[in-house]
Image (cartoon, helix red, strand yellow):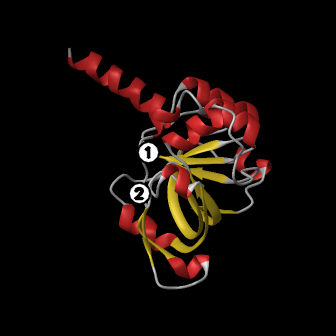
Amino acid sequence: MKNLKYPFDEKSVRSLKAGDAVSITGRIYTGRDKFHKFFADGGKLPVDFRDGALYHCGPVVIRNQGSGISDQWRVVAAGPTTSVRENPYEPDFIAKSGVRLIIGKGGMDEKTLAAMKKHGCVYIQAVGGGGAIYADAVKKVAGVSLLKEFGAAEAVWHLDVVDFCGVVAMDAHGHSLFDKVRRNSKEALGNLI
């Protein structure tokens, strides 16, 4: 298990290989469809993603009675959403934001993989259906951006996590576990026919 701590520097990220198990500690930000479209349309990023992490997630967040931001919100589920929907936006986002980790499920396309290789970014596969487990890794809601504009599921949540686990599925060397599985599956199918 490789331990990644925020900020995620390029050298550490480039040392990761597809198939590495990772544990993430520090700040991550959520972002889904509305966020990506907002960015593509020229919207100003609400936080600095440089050397940071973008999590394709629409967490279930409930309001507490506390007065401070970290007392005010509690994450009860934080499972990944399907990343492929962000393919039209992600290469440009990677290039312009300096983000180092993209977290989601299901992988992304060749253009995104090429952007990861060029700019030093990796895709971390989180487990679908593990929303409660990932919520346990969220130790604090440090803030939220674009809540009024996008609603709770699409807002950019600022989450402080400890031991948020996943697998590097696409690395900064151009390797993708998803491509490997596709090739192996096609070969196995060919052998059956």
In this view, the residue in front, 63 or 99, is 63
- Indicate which disc residue 105 carries: 1
At x 71%, y 54%, the residue is: 47
Tell me if mark 1 has few (under 14), some (14-19) or many (20+) residues whose alpha carbon lies within 10 angstroms of its own.
many
- Indicate which disc residue 123 carries: none
Report the side of 139 relative to 106 (left or right). Answer: right
Q: Is residue 173 visible?
A: no
Q: Quadrant of the C terminus?
A: top left
Element class at badge 1: loop
First reached walking from the N terminus: tag 2 or tag 1: 2
Residue 120's place in the image compared with 2, above or below, is above
Residue 161's place in the image compared with 56, above or below, is below
Q: Quadrant of the N terminus?
A: bottom right
Going by the picture, which residue comes out furthest to the front?
Answer: 148
Report the side of 99 relative to 126 (left or right). Answer: right
At x 79%, y 49%, the residue is: 11
